[in-house]
Image (tube, helix red, strand yellow):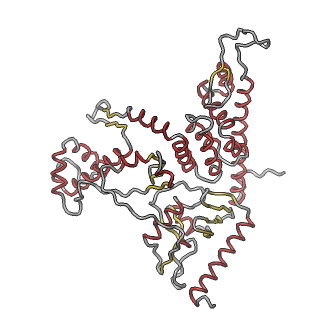
Amino acid sequence: MAFTPIDELDATAVLAAAEDALVRRRAVEVEDLQLIAQWADLHADDPRRAPDGGRAWCGEDRLVEVGGDGTPLVQELCLPELAIARRVHPLAVRAVMADVLDLRHRLPRTWAVVESLGCEPWVARKVATISRGLDQFQVTIVDQAVADAIAGESPARVLDLARAKVIEADPDGYAARLDEQLRRRFVSLSRPDQHGLQHVIARVETGSAIWVDHLVDRVADALDARRDLVPDLPADASRDELRAVAFGWLAHPESVLELLDSSPPDTQRRRRARAVVYVHLHEAALHHHGVARVEELGPLLLDQVRRLLGHAHVDLKPVVDLHDEIRVNAYEHPESVKERVHLRTVGEVFPHASRVSRAVDIDHPVEYDEHGPPGQTGDHNAGPLSRTHHRAKTYLGYVVRQLGPDDYVWRTPHGLHRRVDATGTHPIDDEIAEELIRSAALQHALDKIERRFGRSA
């Protein structure tokens, strides 16, 4: 096979070579993990026992538990030599050995995906670390969920899933660990620097941090409208500077109350703030400890959600039935459709995207035709995209077709095909992808005819 220098590759060849390099890199990383596992296997016998069962002198070596519950023990003093070969500290070797033993013995389905080169090994290692506190039976819940998602979902979404499953597998243990961490909350000050400035460092619950940040914003808005109260603040002060001044005002609550009460109507808000929090949970979550996925925050116990909302007015919204379909006769997606799209897709639908925020554009996979029939905008033709991905799709020749409520097939400008569904992003055969795109286009054309001329057409 002739070798073509990289600087002579065209765009299509670069993409093909990049995919090939990805597979080869993963193969090398998996081989590295397998070698570490083999080293552990070679040093799994008790060094204090001779072949005849008697006591052996071994320089006080011993078997130690490197991985989680259910993993084989390993001779402690085998680690330094492998560290020398890998040119790292023995603790680094111990960490990676713990991960690979956990994967092989506690997360076998996930390990199978790793060995098939279907995912990034570092993501699987991170899952092993996250789930190490579970016993060998509890961790099965994590393994099943992660193995189904790790090949297609982005690393951020996989790790959020793993954290949620760890809570679900052992809610009592998680609650106990949470209580332990709550005992480690603190607020401290750094030493003053040469300019007389200091850092305020705090470790608090997420809810407290969010509310403090919210209050700083409120005070900053009020001070922005009353610059006369801060005469030494430069006229061109940045938002960060204004927020820093506002944070300082929190040391004088009586002044903050007076400021907020006297601020202009457009900056006044009720002292008891209102919050919009999107919580996704299964019915089972209501019957015991329960795990909720809070948008922007990740998995939390229901008790944590209660504390999060403890200082706010709470408005409950009805459950949205996603089995219905909504269509409108306008270019803009109304809020009702946006809400349904976000609940259905739980993140943007560009291949391998990781964003789960609602700060995205809602794109028409099939371009809106201002001269077309009514009903072009709705659940059937909507996909959340970040602004950059939206621009790329609009101007660079990407093709996307929506196959179902949360199912999309993509073709890139140079002919790569991906399918994005509820389980993530998956490479798809070119012929199958093109057939899906043609079928979706045909269905769209038939739908336009029906809407323009009626079902009888």
State the residue in front, 393 or 62. Answer: 62
Report x, y in % for residue 368. 53, 77
Name which residue lies at 69% across and 41% down: 108
Could you tell me which residue is drawn at 45 percent across and 74 percent down? Answer: 332
Judge left or right: residue 76 versus residue 317.
right
Question: As drawn, which residue projects farthest toward the right?
Answer: 1
Answer left or right for 439 relative to 196.
right
Relative to residue 62, is residue 288 depicted above or below? below
Q: On the rendered image, what quadrant is the C terminus found in? A: bottom right
64 or 428, which lies in front?
Answer: 64
Confirm whether residue 376 shows in the render.
yes
Q: Position of residue 409 (x, y in %)?
A: 64, 66
Asked whether, in this view, residue 411 is left or right of residue 327, the answer is: right
Q: Is residue 238 visible?
A: no
**Residue 363, placed above or below residue 230:** below
Q: How many marks?
A: 0
Q: Position of residue 216 (x, y in %)?
A: 28, 49
Image point 52% across, 67% down: which residue?
322
Residue 176 location (% of width, % of height): 45, 35
Residue at the image point whose x is 69% and y is 25% from the top:
85
Residue most extreme to the front: 287
Q: Is residue 60 left or right of residue 164?
A: right
60 vs 315: above or below: above
Tell me the quarter of the picture where residue 103 sits: top right
Figure quadrant of residue 13: bottom right
